Amino acid sequence: MLIWMWIFHSGYLRDYLSVCVMLFPFSLQDTTAYPYQFQDDPYLSPRTSVEFKLFSLSQESGRSAAKYFINNYPKFFTKDFAEPHIPCLMPETVSLCLEEVSEEALKERISLRKVTAAADMYDQLLQAGTEVSLETTHDLLDLICLYGDRDPVQDGEPETEDMEESGEEPKKRKGRVRRASDIIKSTWKQNNNAERIFNLLPERDTHCYSALIRGTVLHGAYEKAFSLYTDMQNNRLSADIHIFNALIAAAPEVRDKYQEKWDVINDLLKQMSQQKVQPNLMTFNCVLKALRRCGSLGKSQALQTLSEMKALQIAPSLASYSHILAIFYKPASAGQGNTDVLQEVIAELAGTSFTCQDPDDVLFFINAMRICLDNKDLELGYQIQSLVEVGENWRLLGDSFQQSVYYGRFFNLLCLMEHIDVVFKWYRRLIPSVYYPNPQGLRDLLQALDTDNRLDLLPTIWKDICTLGHDNKSDLVEELLALMARDGHSHEVQESFAACALDIKRVYDENRGKPSLEWSNSSLSHVASLLLRANKTQHAWDVLQLFKAKNRVPHEELLGEFLSACHRDGSPQKAVELVHLSTAFCLSATPNLAKRALAEFDLTEEQSYATWNDRGKHSSRISSE
Amino acid sequence: MFRLLFRTVYTARNSSVNVNESLSLLAKCDKANCTVPALRVSNGGGLRALSTNSVRLCEKKNESVTANQDEETKTDAEADPKETKTLVTQEADEDSKVIKMAEQSEEPLVSKADDGGSTTQQHQVDVTTEQDVVTPEKVETDAAMSGKESLLSLLGAMKVDVTSKRKPKIVKVKQSEFTPMSRPPAMESTISMFQQATAEASSQSEKLDPELVAAASAAASTLPNSSQAESQLLKQLRQHEAVTEAQKKGDVTKDLGLIIADMKIGKHSNRQNARPSNQIRFDEDGQGYTHDRGITSELDSVRRNIRRNLFSGKRLNIFARKTDDGADSAVARPTLWDMDFAHQLSEVTNQMPRNGLEEMIQWTKEGKMWQYPINNEIGLEEEASVSFHEHIFLEKHLAEGFPQKGPVRHFMELVVGGLSKNPYLTVQQKKEHISWFRDYFHQKEEVLKEADVYLN
């Protein structure tokens, strides 16, 4: 850091930002550290994805609370210390200042995005007979249509107000920042303020129609949008680019058959051409997105659309490619084993740095990685990952959930296809700085370890599992135990396995109260046999007692192993106890066990009698049954 | 020699640890068996063969290197002994081809070695180099020993010293060199050329040195049907002799040309190895091998050549190319929709800063941080157009509306002096300040005149 500061101050490089941007590929990301946003606060050290989410949300909600307070109580924040003035640190005006009925007041309400207040003010102005300028009317229509005649949730407003107002909205967004995607789910009400004001207008121009059509499409009233468009054509108005984009996006919704959908889109495009409206990137992205829902027709038309884009010198964005990929690789038909299109797309994109041009851009990487995973194409996976690392492309990975899905798929692909050492290289690089694996990801890793015969690494993986908070996932822990117990290993490995098994046992004991982690038959036997193999006989006996406590029945092989361990230790007493135990479990192997005990151990008369007795008990019980 | 080269290449590929070892071996062998370089110098034709073959070998090497490159990049060029274990199986067929080629290339070399009885030694060099790779610790002793003895001992030791890893290959080589009859028929197809080549090479020994015969019989005795093998060996040695005789008479170049023309270089298509498709694709969902790589990989490469390009298809032909009339010259003011779209885009790409520098970039963009390099006039952009003299020489504003002398004038001069030293006010504020006094004294003009201090 000092070096950079010296560079800045020495005046060789004048523009700070350009220097930062230039340096930033080299400003290394510490892969062993927590995400940077949490480094200030030692209490916020996320180890799992849940914690990550919780901490980010708490951090963000803290910021929102502060902002709410500042904006709502500006009287406490009058002192402007900063010289020069820093606007973003000072309170914003969120409340209305103008109370009188005037166009100025209407403008203020529009700029503050108070939808209902603005509509009311417009009505009052009309009643008072005041003429509202065309520009303000346009703004008002835009506002009402964008928010679907509903007040947007603003940063400074408590959530409860909104809940009262719009009870019909699903209450599923808990603690999530409201986005445009939430608005999409809301519905367009018949004869709402937008339509009412629109109908009241003495003359309607393209802008009014544009606002209304975009609003209806955004809020799901697709038929209404098309009828408005017809209405507009009857009034001999020419449409603008936004109308066409919105209508193309709505086209798949108003027709059922693939061919009809495409016909509607094709018609719209031809009308655009007739009305001399130049298409833009969003037009073609809308076409491609619509083609995703045109089934088999999509493939041919998508390529033609892409050629058209090239002919018009419109560079496709990541979203265009994402749609193309979605058209060519349906999620259902995995394993078609043909990644030609993806390869070409990647070859086209390799080494380019992107800026976001379409909200759908962020879906590209996640889709591309899914195709790689479906086709098990490691090479392409690496190419996509290197594309992510170019420039600022990582910003296009989407939100934290999408990122975790992307990295999860990449890691899954690595586990499937790559050699274990390379897998571990990526494992250390991705975890936990950018990716918190889910139990499935860890299970993939275990399988990769199994495939490459590096089971000796299992204890370290167990530590990571504990750190990642997956030690309460019983199926994962059981798989780990099964892998450890499956084969015999060298002495050191067995020692480490036994230590690991004891650790697992401790976790089980700690979790006693919770239902998530319950001793199962197999897990108990695996722990016991692991301990036996490492000559931790006493611990193994403890585990054996657990069988009784947990109402589980040990396997016969396990008891055989115990007997061998007793023989190794030379403790006939234990052997007799073992036979007793076996009798208590009513195991069918009891006679064999007793026979072995009698044959292999020098038992005292009393002991041998007891053993015989056990054997007899078993047989008598069998006969009585 | 070629075998040695190849082996070194191979071992170098196998593990970086072995590289130094085998390189030193190479040097050692060159020193110990100086007949090899001598051979190279002695015969022009041989040299030619050597050079062509070395070129081919280099080609081969390059190719295998490129073939390995994608594997290498995966491991980030970490030469990992574990990794190559998986490679070995992949390259098994490549290996066999390379061996074939190495053997072929040996043929012209040996056939040129017509200067006396060095063939035995040559042969021995061959075998020694072979053995070098297998048991490096044997090299020094081998070099020290005399040729025939070492051959015998080597042949005896061969079976014992090979490591488990190399065993099948070495045994195969040995069998095909000495006992063509006893090898299984399946092997015939893969190494027939190789065997033929060695047969020619071995028949080249001119006089059938009795010690060589003894060596051959010793070698044959290690094999199951020894008598048959021995007779076979001797027969080949004699054939070898005949060929050498013929070549001595001068049809060297023709023969060489034939040999070179006959050579087939097993060339791999790069594409085949460049793709990960050679790896076993095991499908979890029970589909097993999704591709039959053997045939389809070639089909793949064909298809790849004629594949349709993403952009090469026909277009919709709806829109005409935009004419640069600047139809969009009237830029409309941003509507709410535009703002919302921009907001969406920024939301989507709004990532948390990953490190301190990124955070500082963000703060700078928000205006919370000083811009570097530090400039103490930042935020005073509107003042930048105002020259300093307007701040300092304020007397000109006193010319109008103020008395020329007297206490008021004196007072105002003091005010102007103070204002000229005040850095915190803009010129406009200073002017306003002065004009306030002007108004004030105008209002109080009567009073001042009465007091007789307002002199004009």
Image (cartoon, rainbow, N blue to C red):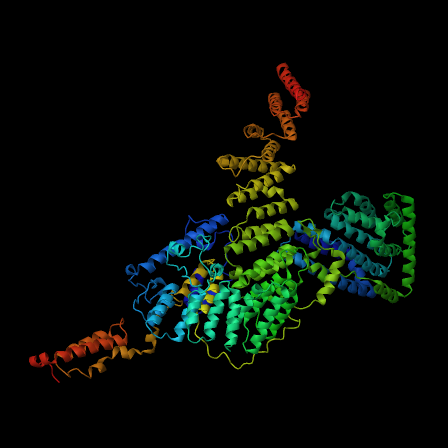
Whether residue A434 appears in this view of the structure is yes
- Quadrant into which the N terminus of chain A falls: bottom left
Q: Between residues B125 and B447, which one lies in front from this camera angle?
A: B447
Residue A116, above or below A427: below
Residue A248, above or below B359: below
Q: Quadrant of residue B323?
A: bottom right
Residue at the extreme bottom of the image, as rendered: B456
Whether residue B24 appears in this view of the structure is no
Q: Left or right? Give the position of B167 relative to A50.
A: right
Q: Left or right? Give the position of B238 relative to A315.
A: right
- Quadrant into which the C terminus of chain A falls: top right
Rendering coords of residue B4 (x, y %): 76, 55
Rendering coords of residue B177 (x, y %): 84, 51
Q: Between residues A261 and A546, which one lies in front from this camera angle?
A: A261
Name the residue: 40% across, 72% down: A137
Residue at the extreme top of the image, as rendered: A605
Q: Between residues A166 and A46, which one lies in front from this camera angle?
A: A166
Rendering coords of residue A436 (x, y %): 52, 50
Disc count in the image? Answer: 0
Q: Between residues A127 and A325, which one lies in front from this camera angle?
A: A127
Rendering coords of residue B106 (x, y %): 81, 58
Q: Left or right? Give the position of B291 relative to A254.
A: right
Q: Left or right? Give the position of A60 relative to A75.
A: right
Residue A503, above or below B145: above
